[in-house]
Amino acid sequence: MITRSLGAIVAARLRQFPAVALIGPRQVGKTTLARSLAGDADSVYLDLEDPADLAKLDDAAGYLRGFRRRLVVIDEVQRAPGLFQLLRVLVDERTRAGESAGQFLLLGSAAPDLLRQSGESLAGRIAYLELSPLDVCETGGDLASRLWVRGGFPPSFLAESDWQSAEWREQFIRTYLERDVPQLGPRVPAETLRRLWTMLAHGQGSLLNLAALARSLAMDGKTVARYVDLLADLFLVRRLPPFHANVRKRLVKSPKVYVRDSGLVHTLLRLDDEDGVRGHPVAGASWEGFVLETLIRAAPDRARASFYGTATGVEIDLLLELPGNRLWAIEIKRSSAPKVEKGLRIAIDDLQPDRTFLVYSGDERYPQGGGIEVTGLTAMANALAELEPAREV
């Protein structure tokens, strides 16, 4: 069992809010984490993909009222959209009876539906937390290369061999395309969505160009935009927005787009092991996305992530606006002997960040001049995690 960093935060939110929604992609470990938390309390667990559990909610009000003073865990809660209005009533009843926190833990893998339904009914009564795939803070920095190649979904990372890991990821992609997307979103041809997903993997970390994607897929830009929205809503793709700075330069206005799990990037491109990944042109961009995801997860909850780019090609891979009006600039290099390029120093002069880091594939930490700190991924992630008081609960 790998201890999940989010576990302590979920427990803390349950002590604070009547309901907590734990969201994230399928197979990321939401159920395992919820069961471990429920095992420490007097609780009941319902999986709404199990027909027997779903049938228990035919008379949901009568059934759930039988578990006062107990934590009720409801998995795949978006499958019962009519349940949220009842949950508001039950939360208010239990709150008036003196049970103000820790009433319901809701798990979901469809962000738009769950957030909309719960937001309309449970506003002010619910906290939202996203569980992402494993990261180096959870697996240990010595396994960073394996985590990068296989990705952070637990069954993929923990597979006995690279072949088994690759096969699991292939089946994961197929299941999402053929079963989950039709259930959770609009009717999308599986082959079309896979082609789009693969194109995004080829362009990992590039500016989102909907017109170019539309031409390649022979469809209109609005349709492609909806498909990208769908992949983002399912926690499979990230659109990283550009940073808006008050500088006298023409700035990039389009977001960058990343397939969020590096293991899925590699499977979409048919790269099954470390040798295949390192020899492919996408290796640098894949590493960049892997580091970026790790650092965004490690950052404080209210941090805002973006990138800086100008029309002349000056860039910083990741900017984190941290609580307290602090700006951290982070450049990402896969090289074990990274060099500071002129563009980074120009960007630093433009933005004047509070701290600037160059994150690379090694483990040493040393200054590089001009206020730039060279550091490894694990140390950088730990430094960000320590900024969030809630992580110490």
Image (tube, grey):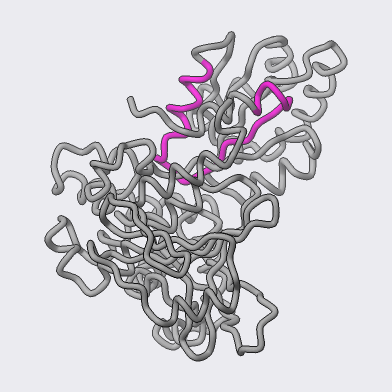
Q: Is residue 271 above or below residue 28?
A: below
Q: Residue 191 lies in magenta, yes or no? A: no
Q: Nearer the viewer, residue 10 or 300?
A: 300
Q: Residue 15 lies in magenta, yes or no? A: yes
Q: Is residue 231 above or below residue 204?
A: above
Q: Is residue 232 above or below residue 378?
A: below
Q: Picture quarter containing residue 251?
A: bottom right
Q: Is residue 175 left or right of residue 9?
A: left
Q: Is residue 203 above or below residue 354?
A: below
Going 60% across and 61% down the picture, which residue do you hit? 327
Q: Is residue 316 left or right of residue 62?
A: left
Report if residue 186 is visible in the image. Answer: no
Looking at the rendering, the stretch of residues picked out in magenta corresponds to: 13-38
Report if residue 327 is visible in the image. Answer: yes
Going 47% across and 65% down the picture, which residue do you hit? 371
x, y (%) of residue 6?
Answer: 51, 33
x, y (%) of residue 181?
Answer: 47, 55
Q: Nearer the viewer, residue 65 or 285?
A: 285
The quarter of the rendered structure image containing the N terminus is: top left
Q: Is residue 279 left or right of residue 198?
A: left
The quarter of the rendered structure image containing the C terminus is: top right
Question: How many marks are shown on the rendered structure?
Answer: 0
Going 57% across and 15% down the picture, which residue do you hit? 44
x, y (%) of residue 380?
Answer: 42, 49
Q: Nearer the viewer, residue 227 or 52?
A: 227
Going 84% across and 11% down the picture, which residue do you hit? 97
Q: Picture quarter containing residue 222?
A: bottom right
Q: Nearer the viewer, residue 192 or 6?
A: 6
x, y (%) of residue 272?
Answer: 17, 57
